[in-house]
């Protein structure tokens, strides 16, 4: 198995596909970081922990998908942190540890279905990340290095 997977990189602009409007902004990681994913890293929705500029460590859900900018030949990594930030953090350093897989990518028939699925992903991630096998990663050395 390829998990846990540790990654860090500068938060870059995504495609502004309206994730913020859905109440679910996703901080995008740059191409080099995506290229460092193991080859067999499946697309879909994952959960784990994340920090911004070596700050507090929060729960996150991450979507790994096909990147439309590269004609769907490359993957993208988008991280939604389960925390309300006062401000955007483009350009800051995002660290993530990816711990588990929730589901494959899906096409949704309606915006309503999509929003329900996101909510469900977030709820599942919240519960799983409280399990002792995962919670220990919150204080992992990876997040402590400045
Ligand atoms: P983009 O297409 O540029 O990625 P989004 O609508 O997905 O735009 O918004 C992402 C940005 O929102 C992130 O880069 C970050 O600066 C900001 N942001 C604010 N709160 C969060 C959060 N809880 N999780 C992730 N990103 C957040
Ligand atoms: Mg985004």
Image: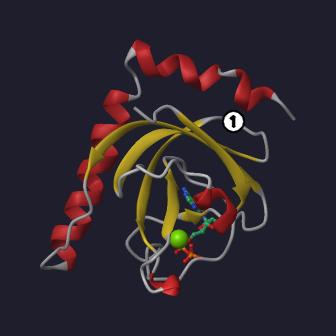
Q: Give the position of the C terminus as an image quadrant.
A: top right
Q: Residues within 10 Å of mark 1 (few under 14, many from 20)?
A: few
Q: Residue 27, position in %: x, y?
A: 58, 63
Q: Residue at x 45, y 86 (%)?
A: 71
**In screen coordinates, is 33 left or right of 98?**
right
Q: Is 89 above or below relative to 3?
A: below
Q: Give the position of the N terminus as an image quadrant.
A: top left
- State the residue in front, 130 or 144: 144
**Element class at badge 1:** loop
**In screen coordinates, is 65 left or right of 119?**
right
Q: Is 63 above or below relative to 69?
A: above
Res. 11 in view: yes
Q: Residue at x 36, y 58 (%)?
A: 43
**In screen coordinates, is 17 left or right of 28?**
left
Q: Residue 135, position in %: x, y?
A: 49, 20
- State the residue in front, 113 or 9: 9
Q: Residue 106, position in %: x, y?
A: 21, 66
- State the residue in front, 114 or 69: 69
How is the structure coloured here?
Answer: secondary structure
Count numbered badges in the picture.
1
Q: Most extreme residue toward the right, as rendered?
A: 146
Q: Most extreme residue toward the left, as rendered?
A: 109
Q: Is 6 above or below relative to 107?
A: above
Q: Most extreme residue toward the top, as rendered?
A: 132
Q: Residue at x 29, y 58 (%)?
A: 118
Q: Identify residue for label 1.
A: 56
Q: Is 16 above or below relative to 33?
A: below
Res. 50 in view: no
Q: Quadrant of residue 97?
A: top right
Q: Residue 23, position in %: x, y?
A: 41, 67
Q: Residue at x 69, y 62 (%)?
A: 32
């Amino acid at each position: 198995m390829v998990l846990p997977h540790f990654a860090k990189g500068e938060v870059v602009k995504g495609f502004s596909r309206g994730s913020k409007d859905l109440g679910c902004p996703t901080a995008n990681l740059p191409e080099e970081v995506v290229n460092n994913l193991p080859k067999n890293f499946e697309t879909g929705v994952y959960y784990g922990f994340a920090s911004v500029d070596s700050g507090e460590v929060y729960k996150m859900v991450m979507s790994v998908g096909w990147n439309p900018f590269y004609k769907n030949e490359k993957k993208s990594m988008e991280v939604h942190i389960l925390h309300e930030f006062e401000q955007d953090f483009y350009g800051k350093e995002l660290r993530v540890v990816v711990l588990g897989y929730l589901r494959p990518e899906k096409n949704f028939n309606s915006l309503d279905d999509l929003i329900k699925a996101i909510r469900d992903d977030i709820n599942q991630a919240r519960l799983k990340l409280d399990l002792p096998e995962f919670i220990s990663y919150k204080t992992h050395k990876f997040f402590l290095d400045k």
